[in-house]
Image (cartoon, helix red, strand yellow):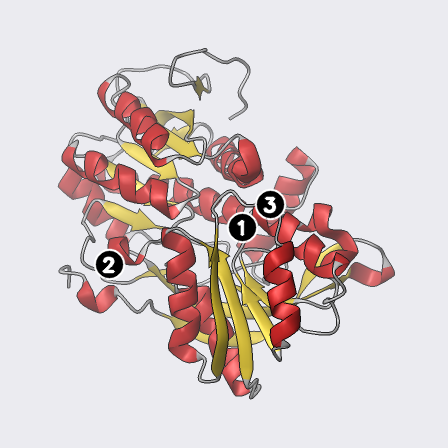
């Protein structure tokens, strides 16, 4: 659904017009639409818009609209936006949420309001484990999963020692914890950088002096663009292999260009995953928006379609939350990733792949070349701590 206007509110969110009816399903898409993380929010928004458009503007057969909120990458702003959507706009569903610290700030108000969160990005360990809730679902990932896959791959490659790095916030800590869970070599340094840091020269000098066999990082969005470019400019590219998660993907590759060439990434999805749903999604997305979708767009697309599948159990009615939850738990979603299965904590059980960053077909266009499945049907580590069984 295309935004054709903006309402300048103090909390600042946009409303996409839709056919209004007494039983209109309202979905609040809260994401990062400004600052360094804005590129990921754009993918969230475009993926959701495409899904609702393909569903004829309806969810579960009922007219639907999406309200957009910019959390500005700040937990307090995200909570204000969510509160406004829940209280003033009476949304039943919240989706999006790029950053885990924002998700942790908004999940309790969503649960208390009897609404449902379908996360399309962040997957904090707390949310997947002890703070799990019947009202929280994910179509993306639990933070530890992709780094667990990369840790397993690097272990199997018998890489003896590494430096690992991430921003100092909830997801960064989860990512490095996940990597260490499966990597059995020596960690020469575990470095946490400022959440808004743009200059990594000091850390890159430290890497050079330590001379590890490899470096593993998590730097999403604009952070990743800065880090990977500086890694190449410092002369480390090609000398010390760079491995990452949620750093070198379709949100950053257009800006990274050759700075990513030869590096490695792990993840649950790419535009080249072979199944009819994904092939149709990627083609439709590129035709509509003129760029290649990322896992953020894919997870957002699946989030709207999961809501649609769940609401079919109630005929589009949103009054019976328990019935909607049952519908979401049993929904037969034909996902862009192929087989889609929710664990007991409502996080996906899914394959994780190794990608090598390369130029596509002899051009200068960088893409994630799929190398192999690292962890098939991989469930997250924290489901065992969730009270839902």
Asked if labels 1 and 3 touch by Cβ distance under 8 angstroms, the answer is: no
Left or right: residue 15 versus residue 257 is left
Helix, strand or loop for disc 1: loop
Helix, strand or loop for disc 3: loop
**Above or below, 161 relative to 323:** below
* Snapshot quadrant of residue 142: bottom left
Residue 159 placement (x, y as % from top left): 57, 84
Q: Residue at x 55, y 86 (%)?
A: 160
Q: Residues within 10 Å of mark 2 (few under 14, many from 20)?
A: many
Residue 136 placement (x, y as % from top left): 25, 47
Left or right: residue 236 versus residue 110 is right
Asked whether the viewer can see residue 292, the reply is yes
Residue that mark 2 sits on: 345
Q: Mark 3 to mark 2: distance in Å? A: 35 Å
Q: Mark 2 to mark 1: distance in Å? A: 25 Å
Q: Residues within 10 Å of mark 3 (few under 14, many from 20)?
A: some
Identify the mark nearer the N-term, 3 or 2: 3
Helix, strand or loop for disc 2: loop
Q: Residue at x 48, y 43 (%)?
A: 301
Residue that mark 3 sits on: 198
Residue 89 placement (x, y as % from top left): 28, 18
Identify the mark nearer the N-term, 3 or 1: 3
* Snapshot quadrant of residue 228: bottom right
Q: Nearer the viewer, mark 2 or mark 1?
A: 1
- In the image, 33 versus 59, the foreground residue is 33
Residue that mark 1 sits on: 220
């Amino acid at each position: 659904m295309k935004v054709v206007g903006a309402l300048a509110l103090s909390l600042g969110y946009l409303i996409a017009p839709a056919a209004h009816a007494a039983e209109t399903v309202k979905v609040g898409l809260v994401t990062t639409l400004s600052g360094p993380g804005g590129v990921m929010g754009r993918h969230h928004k475009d993926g959701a818009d495409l899904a609702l458009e393909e569903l004829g503007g309806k969810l579960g057969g009922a007219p639907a609209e999406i309200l957009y909120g910019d959390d500005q990458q700040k937990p307090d702003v995200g909570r204000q936006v969510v509160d406004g959507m829940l209280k003033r706009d009476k949304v039943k569903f919240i989706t999006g949420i790029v950053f885990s610290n924002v998700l942790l700030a908004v999940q309790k108000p969503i649960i208390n309001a009897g609404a449902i969160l379908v996360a399309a990005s962040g997957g904090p360990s707390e949310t997947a484990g002890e703070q799990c809730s019947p009202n929280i679902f994910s179509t993306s990932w639990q933070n530890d999963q992709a780094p667990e896959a990369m840790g397993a791959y690097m272990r199997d490659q018998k890489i003896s020692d590494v430096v690992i790095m991430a921003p100092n916030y909830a997801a960064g800590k989860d990512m490095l914890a996940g990597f260490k869970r499966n990597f059995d070599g020596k960690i020469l340094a575990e470095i946490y950088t400022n959440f808004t840091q743009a200059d990594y020269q000091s850390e890159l000098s430290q890497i050079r002096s330590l001379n590890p066999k490899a470096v593993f990082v998590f730097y999403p969005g604009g952070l990743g663009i800065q880090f990977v470019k500086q890694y190449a400019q410092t002369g480390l590219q090609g000398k010390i292999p760079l491995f990452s998660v949620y750093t070198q993907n379709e949100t950053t590759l257009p800006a990274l260009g050759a700075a990513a060439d030869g590096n490695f990434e792990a993840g649950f999805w790419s535009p080249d995953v072979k199944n009819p749903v994904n092939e149709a999604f990627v083609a439709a997305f590129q035709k509509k928006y003129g760029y290649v979708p990322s896992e953020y767009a894919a997870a957002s697309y699946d989030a709207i379609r999961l809501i649609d599948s769940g609401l079919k159990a109630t005929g589009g009615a949103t009054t019976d939350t328990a019935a909607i939850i049952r519908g979401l738990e049993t929904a037969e979603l034909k996902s862009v990733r192929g087989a889609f299965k929710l664990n007991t904590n409502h996080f996906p059980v899914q394959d994780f792949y190794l990608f090598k960053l390369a130029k596509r077909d002899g051009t200068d266009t960088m893409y994630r070349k799929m190398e192999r499945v690292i962890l098939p049907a991989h469930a997250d580590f924290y489901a065992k701590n969730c009270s839902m069984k």
